[in-house]
Image (cartoon, grey):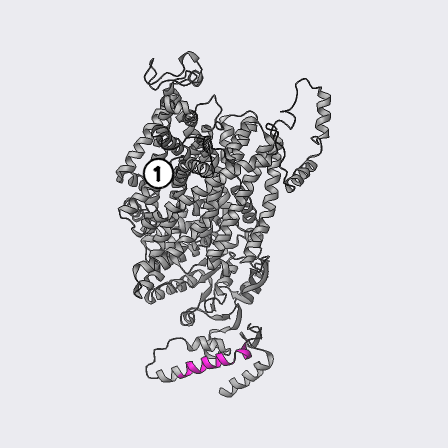
Amino acid sequence: MWKTVLRRVLIMIPQVIILSILIFFLAKMMPGDPFSGQINPNTDPKQLEALKRAAGLYDPIPVQYGRWVGNLFKGDLGTSYIQHVPVTSLIADRAVNTFWLALLTTTISYGISIPLGITAGRHQDEWQDQAVQIFNYVTFAVPPFVFYILGIWLFGFTLGWFPISGSVSPNASGFWGTLGSQIYHIILPACLVALITTTSIVQYLRTGIVDNKVEDYVRTAHSKGVPENVVFRKHILRNSLLPIASSFGTTITGLLSGSMIVESVFSYPGMGKLFLDSIGQRDYTTLTALILIFGILTLLGNLLSDIIMSIVDPRIRIK
Amino acid sequence: MAKEIIQVKDLKVHYPIRSGFWNRITDYVRAVDGVNITINEGETYGLIGESGSGKSTTGKAIVGVEPVTSGEIIYHDVDITKSKNRRKLNYNKDVQMIFQDSMSSLNPRKRIEDIIAEPIRNFENLTTDQERDRVQELLDIVGMPSDSIYKYPHEFSGGQRQRIGVARAVATNPRLIVADEPTSALDLSVQAQVLNFMKHIQQQYNIAYLFISHDLGVVKHMSENLAIMHRGRLVEIGSREDIYNHPMHIYTKRLLSAIPVVDVEHRAENKKHREEVEQEFQNDQSKWYDQEGRVFPLQQVSGKHWVALPKDELEREELKEEGRN
Amino acid sequence: MSEKKENTSTEEVNKKKVSAPASSIKVIAREIFKDKVALTAFIVIIAILLFTFGGSLFLNAEKVTETNIIDAYYGWGTNGHLLGTDDGGRDIVKLLIMGGRNSILIGMGVTAICEVVGLVVGLVSGYYGGYIDAIIMRIVDFIQVLPVMPIEIVLVTVIPHYSPLSLVWIISMFGWTGTARYFRAFILSQRGRDYVLASKTSGSSDFKIMFREVLPNITSMIIIDVVIAIASNIGVETTLSFIDYGLPSSVPSLGTLIGFANDPVNVVSRPWLWLPATVMLLAISLSINYVGRALQRAGDARQREN
C-alpha cells in the first residue's frame, strides 16, 4: 500500500511544478507591480526604473521564477502591495477561519447525508426514498449562491435567527464568549453549504446500497439465515461506503473553491473573501499566493482521496 | 495441385504484463507463440484448441484486426501484418471473418441491408440498385427471406443471425473466410444447417475457410487439413486422416478421447480409455512440454503430418506406432 | 419481370410494418408527456424561453442598459415599471428579459463547446488508446485538479478586450474535461465489441466506425448530458456574474441582478431588485434539471430493455 501512496506523491510533484509555472505566468499577466501601490506620482520615471531594476523586475523570466520558488520554500510568500504586511501572516489569519468553516461544514454534511443515503437505499422506492430524491434533485439543480442568498434572507434578515456577517461579534469577550460568538456566526453558512454538498454523497450512497442489495453475496447471506440488519450493516453498507470515502478528499477541495461565494455572501473573513478582496484591490502578491495555495490544497485533496481509497478497498491494496 | 493462397510464418502475438513499482514490463502473455499455417485455395483448414489456446487470436491476426508482435503472413507475396500493405491490397476484400457471437457482431442499430452492404460499399463501386440486388442475392444464398433487408438484428434468431453474418462475409467474393467458432453459440440442430450453408457456398464460390473451433466433432465434418493448438503453439498438424486415425501428441489424443461417443455397449471401455489418456497426459507433461511448460517445435512425421516432439522422442513414438500397427 | 415488381411492392409494405429500435426522439417525447411534472417543467422552460428570447426581439440592448439616475430605485409597480428600477434607473422587467436571455445563451454556448470538444477528445482518446490516450488523459487530469473558480476570476480580470464571448471561452476551457472522460469511458466499453471488429474487417476506416457505428448507440446519453450541462453552465455564469466577475457590467445577466442582494440594504428594503431574478433562475434550473432527470430515467429503462 505504501508503494501506491509513494507513487501518487511522486506523480504529484510534476503536477505541482507545472501548476506553479502556470500561476507564475498568470501573475505576470496581471498589470501592476510592487511599486504601483507605493509610488508617489511625482517620482522621477528614471528613478522608478532604477528601483524596478533593483527589485529584479527586468530580470529574465526563468530567473524571476526561480527567485519566486526559492522564496516559497523559505516560507516567504511576498509582501502585500496594499496592506504592506507579509502575505503569509495575512493568509494565516484568514486560513484559520476558512478551516473551521470547512470542518463544520464537512461534519454537518456527512452527518446529514449518510443517514439520508442509508434511508433512501433501504426504503427504495418508498416515500422516504422519494423524499430524499426530491431533496437531492433540488440541492443539485439550484446554483449554490441562490441557496445562500435565500438562506441569509430567510434566517438572517427576516427571522433574525443568525448573524449575517463576520466571524465573531465585536462585543464578544472572554474565551467562552468569543468561542460561542464564533460558533454562532459559523452555523448558518456551514449549514447552507452542507446542504449543497450532501447531494453527491447521498446519491453515491443510495446507488451503492441499491446496487449491492441485489448482488449474489447478499443473497447468499440471506439464505444462510443472517438477520436483515446484520446483512445490511456488515455487507451492504461496508461496500457502499467505499465511494464516499474516496470522495472525502474531493469534497474538501470543492469546499475551498466554493468558499469564495459563501464568504462573499456572509462577509466571512476567510481565504475566499481575501481572494476576492485582493482581486478588487489589485493586490497581486496575495492573489498569486492564494491561487497557489488553492491549487496545492486541491492536489492534496485528491491525494487524500486516493490514499483513503487504497486503505479502504482491499482490492486496490493487495494490488 | 492445390494453390497456396496464404502463408502464416512464425506468427507471434504477445501481450506485455506490467507490474512492480515502475509499471515495467515484467513478462508477456504469449497468446500466439510461433504458429505456421499454409492454406490452399478452396480448402477448409481446421484450427482446434481449447479456450485460451490462442486460436481466436491467430484468426484475428490473419484477418488483420489483431496487431502482430512478430512473424509474417504472406498473401500475394506481401506481408500483410503491416497495415499499409493491407490497405494497398484491399486485403479485407479477399479475407473476411465470421464471428462467434452473432448478436454482438451485428450492429443493433443497423438494418440488415446496411450490415451486409457495408463491405460492398467499402470495396466495390456499385449503384444503389446493383447493391440492393447483390444483397438480395446473398440473402438468397444463405436461405434468408428477401424482406429481411429492412429488419434489425434483434428480430432474428441466433441461427438466422449467423447466416446473415455468413452473407456479410461472402459479400465481396473473398478468397478466404476466417470462421471463428461460427456454430459454438447455436443449438445442435441449427449448427448442421449453418455448416451446410457454409459448405455449399464454399463449393459454389471456391472459398477457403480457416475453421476455428474447440469441437473436433464439428471440424471433422468440414476440414481436409487440421491443426491442433495448445498454449499458443501448434502441437500437431496433418490431414483429417492423420489426426483422427493416427494422433501422436498426447494433447491430440486427449481431445479425441473427449469427443462424446454414443456407444452404449462399449461404455466401460471408452471410459477406461479416456481415463488412461488423461493419466498419461498428467504424468507425462515433462515429456511432451519443455521446462517452461511450452510446446516443442513441430517435427515432420510423414507427408503433411507434423507433431511437436523432441527428436529422440519422435523415433521412440514412431517405433511404438509401428508396433501397434 | 412482373415478379420483381411484386417483390418491390411487398417490400414497401413490409418497410412500414418493420419496427426499428425506437428512435431516441420518440422515446424522449413519450417520456416527457407521460410524466405530468416533467410536462409542467417542459412548459415552464418553453415559457421562459419565449419570455426572454421573444421579449429581447422587441428590446434594444443599449436603451435597456442606459442609466437614468433620476429614475433610480423605484419600487414595485411605480411609474409604469412593473418590477421597479435598479440603481441606474433601468427597468427591472427589461433587464430580466435581456439578462435571462444572456444567461441562457451563455449556458448554451458553453455547453455546445464543451460537448463537442469533450466528444471528439473522448472518442479519439478512447478509440486509439496508446500514447494518444495517455497524453490526453494526463492533460485532462491536470485540468481537473486546477482550482477553477479562482483562475476564471483572474482571467476575467486580465483578459484584454473582454466581451461575453471571452467569458464563454474562459468557462469552456475548464468544462470539457468531464464530458471527455465520460465519452472515453463509453468508447472503451464498446471498443472490443464484435460489431466494431466486424466493421473493421468489412473495411470501414476507424473514423467511419467511430462516428457512424459507435456514436449512434450513445445519442440518448448525449442528449441527457447536454440538457443537464446547460443548466449547470447557466449556474456557472450566474455565479460569476453574481460576484461581479462574469459578464461585463454593461451586459445584463441574471447573476448581476441577483448580485444586488450582496448589499444588505437591498436585501431588506429593495427586494424587487433581486427577488424576480432569483425566482427566474430557480425556475430555469429546476425545470431543466427535472426534464433532464426524466430523460435519464427513460434512458435507463431503455438500456434495461436492450
Residue type, mark 1 in image: Val
What's the residue at 40%, 56% (across, down)?
A: A239
Name the side, left or right, on which B158 lies relative to B240. left
The image quarter in which residue C75 lies: top left
Position above or below: C73 against A170:
above
Residue B219 appears in the figure:
yes
Q: Position of residue B26 (x, y in %)?
A: 59, 62
Q: Residue furthest front?
A: A174
What residue does disc 1 label?
A138
* Front residue (pair B275, A317): A317
* Front residue (pair B88, C152): C152
Q: Is residue C182 magenta?
A: no
Q: Position of residue B295 (x, y in %)?
A: 55, 73
The image quarter in which residue A105 lies: top left
**Magenta span main SS:** helix
Q: Which residues are magenta?
A: B272-290
Is label 1 in a helix, a strand or a loop? helix
